[in-house]
Amino acid sequence: MDVIAKSRPREQCHVALMSFHVTRFARSAATYESQARIQHLLAERLLALWDKPSEPSAILELGCGTGLLTRRLLRRFPGAHVLATDGAWQMLAQARLLCAGKGGEKLSFALQDAEGGAPAEPELWSRAPYGLVTSSALVQWFPDIERHLRFVAGLVGPEGFYLVSSFTDSNFPELNALLASPPFCYRNFPGLVAEKLDESARRAGFTLQAFQETEDREVLPTPRMVLKRIQSLGASRNPRDGGRLTKATLEGLLDSYADHYGERGGVRLTWKSCVALLRRSSSGCAG
C-alpha cells in the first residue's frame, strides 16, 4: 500500500507535464510548419542515418506533428505502410492536410500518446511488429526515456530499428543561462543526454548503433522574436518549473538577452540536437 501511495505523485507529475506539452503543441499546430527550420534539418539528418539495404514493410511514426518527417518517410520508403501518430488531434489534422495526396492507402493516422504511460491503440497493434519506428524532436519532453523506449520495444520487431532525433539538454544555451539565474531559477532543462540514452536503450532491449550531435545557430532580429519562435513551435517550458514570469521579469529577460547575446543583425539563438539509430536485440529487454 505504501509503495503504491508513494508512486502516485510521480505518475501524476508525468501526466501533468505531458498534458502541458500536448496542449502547447496543439495550440501551435497552425504556426509550427512555418517556424520549423531546424526541425526540417533534423528530419533530413535522421533519415541520413538509415543505411540498411532493405526497406521496412511497416513504419510507425510517433509524434508526427505536422508531418515534416512523415512526408520524407513516404518518399524514402515508397513501398512501406506508414502509420503516423501524435498525442494532439490538432497536429494530426494539420498532418492530414499537408500530406494530402501523398502515400494513398499506404499512409494512415492515429491518435496516440508516445510517452509510454498509456497502452498502444488497437490500430498500432494491428500492424505490429514494425521493422522501423521513428520520432523526431519528441523525446526531449519525456521525463523517463527508458519508459518510452520500453513502449517502443513492445511495438518494434526483433532486429527492428528505432530512428530517433531530439534536442539535447544543452539546447538554447543563451536562454537557459538566463533562466537558470534569479528571478527565474529554472532547473533540469529538458533534453536528451547521450549517456542516458545509451544506458536506457540497453535496459529496454536496444543497442545504440549510431549517434550524432549537431549545433545550429541563427540570428533573429530581437529577443522577443526568439521567444515568439519557441512559442510558435509549442516548445515553451512549463512556468511551474521556475519563477513566475511577470511583465517586469519578462522585460528584464529580454533586456538581458540583448545585452549578453547581441550580434550584428539581432541576437543569437543556438539549437543543439542529436540523431540516433537504435536496433532491437532479438533476446528482448536486458534489465
Image: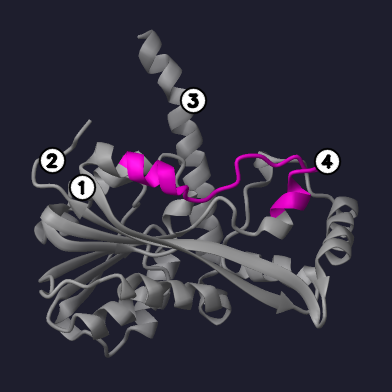
What amino acid is at disc 1? Ala
The disc labelled 2 sits on which kind of residue?
Answer: Gly
Front tag of 3 and 1: 1
Query: In the rendered structure, which segment of residues is drawn in magenta?
Result: 176-200
Mark 2: few/some/many CA within 10 Å (<14, 14-19, 20+): some
Q: Are marks 1 and 2 in contact (CB under 8 Å)?
A: yes
**x and y percent of residue 136 in the render?**
39, 65
Residue matched to label 2: 284
- The residue beneath circle 1 is 153
Residue 84 percent coordinates (x, y) = 28, 68
Residue 114 is left or right of residue 34, and the answer is left
> The residue under label 3 is which amino acid type?
Pro
Q: Position of residue 180 (x, y in %)?
A: 74, 44
Q: Earlier in the sequence, mark 3 or mark 1?
A: 3
Q: CA distance from mark 3 to mark 1?
A: 26 Å
Judging by the rendered image, the residue that carries numbered circle 4 is 182
Alpha-carbon distance for marks 1 and 4?
A: 41 Å
